[in-house]
Amino acid sequence: MERQFKPLVQHWLSELGLVEFFCDDTVMAVLEVEVDRYITKICGGNFEKRWMHSEGAELEHWSNSQVMPWLKLIFHHGFKKEVWTQKLHYILYRSYTKLRISEMLNIITDYPDSTPALHELKFCLQHTRQRPCLIESLKNDITNRVLHPGVSTQNIITVYIAAVKALRELDLSGVVMEMVLEPCTTYLTQREDSVRMIMQGLLWDDGSNDLAAELATTQEPEEVACWNERVTEKPEDWMPDPREADPNKVDKSTRTSDIVTLFIGMYGSKEKFIKEYQKLLSKRLLQTWYGEKSESSEIRNLELLKKRFGEEDMSKCGVMLKDISDSKRINTYINEEYYKKNSLQNNLNLRTMVVSSQFWPDIPNQEYELPEGITKSLELFNKGFENLKASRSLKWLSSVGMVDIELEFEDRQLEISVNPLQASIIYHFQDEDKWTLSELSDSLKIPPTILRRKMTFWLQQGVLKEIEPDNYVTIEKRPGTTSSNASAPAASGGGVVDASEHFVNLCDEEEDEEKANSDEEEEKKKKNEQVFWNYVQGMLKNLESLPLDRIHKMLQMFAMHDSDMQIEMAQLRQLLNDKVQKGLLVIEQGKYKLVRDNS
């Protein structure tokens, strides 16, 4: 009886034209729930496939083969196909849009693979008017998931670049991009390393990343150019801003600017980027100046940056690159005319970089006494340079450079590249296998606090051993010889010289703090390190093992509100390596772990 009653009621309601009156709202509610469920099930997380408006599109097939027959069954003779087709399409578009809005940050990070999802979302937004919801949701997602201390600046920049490209794919006007990325723009300008990270991206050697590719692009993206043409070249086709746009915003150039211009615009001028480029170029040249490939790569980067920043503003950088080629010629001349004729160079191949100091950024230098054998080689270079450039003199920066050395032990040989100060330290141990810190400090003419930090390197390499506080001996007896295959104090195989009136050398960034000589500062540092060590012990007891960067991030969180309790990555690495030397920690697969007996 019940089975007969339902079709009978449906029949008479249909005959009376009341099915739609009684069932319309209920059917719409059921449709929305079922469409949401189905779209989430098959489309969720899948951004590379087209689900609508394509041959064999799954959503359209499902709606035509499953949903429409169900609607026809319900409304029977009163079924209006055209009306319900429009309603169903609207529900499909709205459900699809809602899903994609919730996944928008993932769609951005997957770009360009997620382009099909962006194109379908763009179509749906035109029919559902959900752009304000998209803007608000995506801003919140970026703020909560990206713009916080736990995310590196490099990752934030990567998300920013992907967002610019993806949102321009979605909205040709640039309004959505402008509004969504406003918090990101503000946050990046507050990070101290943002400019440096942006410039490093622009200088990517193989050009494979987004910023390097963008630098090489001299024209604006095709989509932006098309929008500009619509707005500026045909006034009769002018279109007003979308209603979501900020009516008080006068400068609209960010909507169509390329990515490099967007980054420059964050800071209002190009000055910070030019200065940062000079610093990066200086560091890169001092490290790799003797390689032909490196020089050609830097010349290419400079020419591209000139197009962005202007020839005049980049003139100093041009001089820096010219110094590289001049240095190679000077080295060739002195090597042929002086070194080959002098017995001092039998086991020393010295390459020296000569720079024009007024065109280079300041290069930090730690003064110390070079070993006698190295000093004689530098004096010979001075003689050759003064003969070649009679009106100029040189000033050596002894701590700047790179030295390739070979250490011979009783049971092994060690070939390693170190900075000049580290090379000078180990040089002393070829004659005496035991030194105290004070003796070595007097010989090198360097403060003990700085020297103690430098000794850590050789302790970590297993070359030296601290038998008691501030007393060092070589492990496996002593090195037989220390033959230098490259520069004594030299950058990438060379010292650095100033050809105008000074002489320069490559810097060691860790040895710049004279204030460390203060007993009070040293005591404070030890207390802070003990606090950090207590924190690290607690972390490793709970989590067993952690990499250096994870430990550093966790310590930053603990000390977030205490400016006196901050620790740099290099300082933390030194602290942990000291504990490794003392047998309190071990390193396994790049992670620090407490020694069991001490845990």
Image: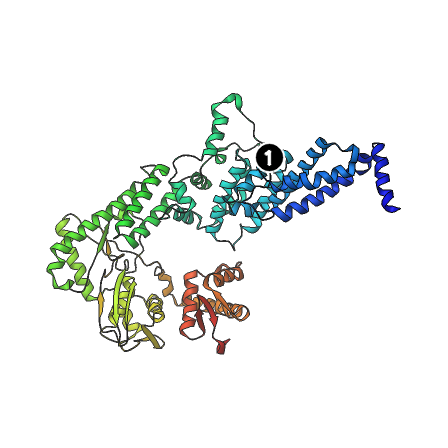
Q: With respect to residue 468, does 209 lie above or below?
A: above
Q: Secondary structure at mark 1?
A: loop
Q: Residue 29 location in percent, x, y?
A: 74, 42
Q: Residue at x 26, y 70 (%)?
A: 407
**Frontmost residue, 411 versus 278:** 411
Q: With respect to residue 311, does 493 lie above or below?
A: below
Q: In this rendering, does residue 499 appear at all?
A: no
Q: Quadrant of residue 306?
A: top left
Q: With respect to residue 281, does 312 lie above or below?
A: above
Q: How many marks?
A: 1
**Frontmost residue, 59 versus 197:** 59
Q: Residue 510 location in percent, x, y?
A: 36, 60
Q: Residue 8 location in percent, x, y?
A: 86, 39
Residue bearing the label numbered 1: 244
Give the amino acid at mark 1.
Glu
Q: In this rendering, does residue 475 appear at all?
A: yes
Q: How is the image coloured?
A: rainbow
Residue, far right: 1
Mark 1 Cα shell of 10 Å, populated few (<14), some (14-19), many (≥20): few
**Frontmost residue, 81 versus 283:** 81
Residue, far top: 236
Q: Residue at x 66, y 46 (%)?
A: 38
**Horizontal side, residue 451 vs residue 234: left or right:** left
**Frontmost residue, 58 versus 266:** 58
Q: Residue 253 location in percent, x, y?
A: 48, 33
